[in-house]
Image (tube, rainbow, N blue to C red):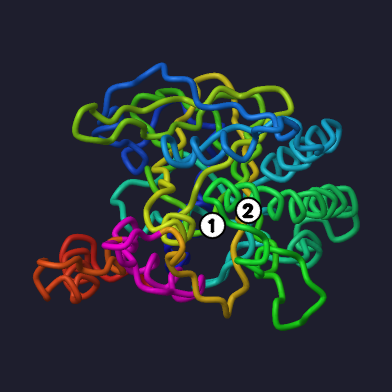
Amino acid sequence: MPSLSDQPLIHHLQQFEFKTLTEVPDSHAWPVVNDHPHGDDAVPVIDLACPDAARLIGQACEEWGAFQITGHGVPVDLLDRLEAQTRRLFSLPTGQKLKAARSPGGVTGYGIANISAFFSKLFWSEGFTIVGSPHDEARKLWPDDSAEFCGAIEEYTSWMKPLGCRLMLLMLASLGLSEGEIDWAVPSNDTTHEAPAPVIQLNSYPACPDPDRAMGLAEHTDSSLFTVLYQGSVRGLQLLHGNHPTRRARWVTVPPLPGALVVNVGDLSHILSNGRFQSVTHRAIVNRTQTRISVAYFYGPPAHFKIAPIEKLMGPQQGPAYRAVTWPEYLTLKRRLYNQALASIRLPTEGEEESRTNTSEIITAAYTRRHGEAKV
């Protein structure tokens, strides 16, 4: 996701406590929140124990770019502890949370959503990013009392790693592929197939006095292969669904289901499937009376591995729709281009103008004119 210098935003946080406000300040007042109609479509719910799970997942990835999963095996009591520890973190005084503030251009720690760099208004939310071990950042918050927090994060990560692999294999199976055809998706002791450090994002969306004028997190797609999201019991996650010529796009709320997890397809899976799987646009809205928390686990390939459209998925007259890219390379594009990163690596089809090869430079110039250069 986009990165930026956090110094002006961190200074703002030093003066800002969501729970003390009785109205939305101008810094957080969005002129348009409901930019699309709302729909009541049912986001697919898939039991991973179902023999037909792979087919159902493939269908959901193509039609929705997202689905909820049950039968995943993650203990309910662990999800409860994860939510409790996340709430414990965000309930700390701002001054204490700032002891673990994300450094300028940094990745880990406390701060505001990185995509804030692309907007003139701030989000009604706080975040805390963990890459790999949680211990270093947690000790900044609780020098002598971080064991419970770290224990919950580490145990959750230990469940997410195999679950992520299982989901990846089911997604590939739905495309007619076997484990042997995508060897990086299978755990290996071979150091050349080293898995990336787990990335977990903790989010808090405080209760808001005027939810129609605030935004928890603006619409975006994820850069990963997919994201596994625990969203607690408070509504707030919305997906943009039905964006095709015969049906107007509309926001659909993903209802929290006890014990269920949400899976969002990311840009890298869109590339891998040559556009068959949809990288879903989603956002977070806020609630008038309840603070919502969520925990996102980003699943991606090894850093050195180049993600490219799978040749087996192409027809006789169809070539790759996107060029090959590593996850770090794609993250760099996302920092510069935000939601236009995917378009920037699309390959021109026969008959398209050669200028398509310069899409990245054109989009970068347009965003620079509109938003200014995002600081990394």
Q: Which quadrant holds residue 255?
A: top right
Which secondary structure, mark 2?
helix
Question: In x, y percent, where is residue 136?
Answer: 78, 67
Q: Which of 43 and 290 is in front in this view?
A: 43
Question: Which contiguous range is marked in magenta?
Answer: 314-342
Mark whose residue sits in front, 1 or 2: 2
Residue ID at (60%, 55%): 298
Q: Nearer the viewer, residue 101 or 86?
A: 86
Determine which residue is flagged by label 2. Answer: 168
Magenta includes 250? no
Determine which residue is flagged by label 1. Answer: 225
Q: Rate crowding at label 1 as few (under 14), some (14 to 19) or many (20 or more) other CA atoms within 10 Å.
A: many
Please say if 257 is above or below 306: above
Q: Which amino acid does label 2 sit on?
A: Met
Q: Which quadrant holds residue 352?
A: bottom left
Q: Nearer the viewer, residue 285 or 224?
A: 224
